Image: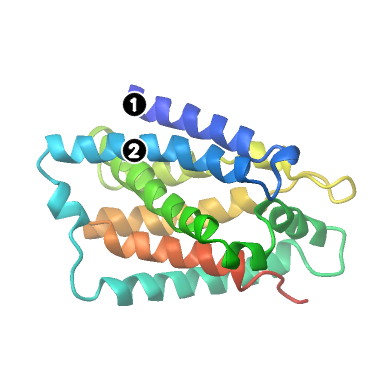
Amino acid sequence: MKGVALVFVLVTAANAVAFRPEFAASWQFWLSLLLPYALGAAAAVRALQRQDRLREVLRPRWGDLSLGAASAAALLLASWIGRSALSPSGSERGAWLYRVYLHVGSSDSLQRSVLLTAALMLIPIFEELVWRSLVLDTLTKRLGSRRAPPVAALLYAASLLPTIHLLADPQAGPNPLLFVAAIGCGLVWSYSASLLGRLPPVMISHMAFTYFSAVQFRFPGA
């Protein structure tokens, strides 16, 4: 469990750095997330190699794309509904969503930059290796397959607690959007990884959800 605690502290610290206001729409934002998660993903791969499970967990199979796409579509729809309720356009709380996208950067800059697009795709892959392999496997050994997924999801969401303050708006107040989204998505991805025993469908879901949330489906109700 020390490994889980270390991952939580490091990722929470990375989020606290990456979402500082001065890093909004900058390369420092992406690098602050990419490097710690890359290290965590490397540790996850080494752990899978030691257990002789790397091929089993990461090997793609027929139907993975369909499973991942269906999961991502459901999460995008739920996200759209949730954002419309929590951060409706035209209200003070609409500034929460604006703050999130102001920090990520414009969709045009993301689409035009090969490096930013690569970071946008790599971070979800690394996150899955860290949270739905390294952390979830450790928790499953300690807590069992029933309790481990929700605990992993809650830890994943809790690592984003700094964003509630860092992405706050002077009028709307503390910003819960990323924290709430992480709870919902974390539960889906954690249970999916636990039930399937594999990561490719979950990685596809996470990449698709992240890309379309950041680039395409930005402002519900606008």
Count the marks: 2
State the quadrant of the C terminus: bottom right
Please say whether residue 11 is visible from this viewpoint: yes
Quadrant assignment, res 70: bottom left
Q: Circle 1 sits on which residue?
A: 3
Give the residue furthest to the right: 171
Residue placed most toward the observer, 170 or 108: 108
169, above or below 13, in the image: below
Q: Residues within 10 Å of mark 2 (few under 14, many from 20)?
A: many
Please say whether residue 1 is visible from this viewpoint: no
Colour option used: rainbow
Give the distance between the C-alpha atoms of the residues marked 2 and 1, in whole angstroms: 8 Å
Q: Residues within 10 Å of mark 1 (few under 14, many from 20)?
A: few
The x and y percentages for residue 141 are 22, 35
Identity of the residue drawn at 35% across and 22% down: 2
SS of the residue under disc 2: helix
Identity of the residue drawn at 36% across and 65% down: 204
SS of the residue under disc 1: helix
Identity of the residue drawn at 23% across and 56% down: 198
The x and y percentages for residue 46 are 21, 35
Identity of the residue drawn at 66% across and 46% down: 26
126, above or below 69, in the image: above
Q: Circle 2 sits on which residue?
A: 135
Mark carried by residue 21:
none
Lateral position of residue 145 relative to residue 171, left or right: left
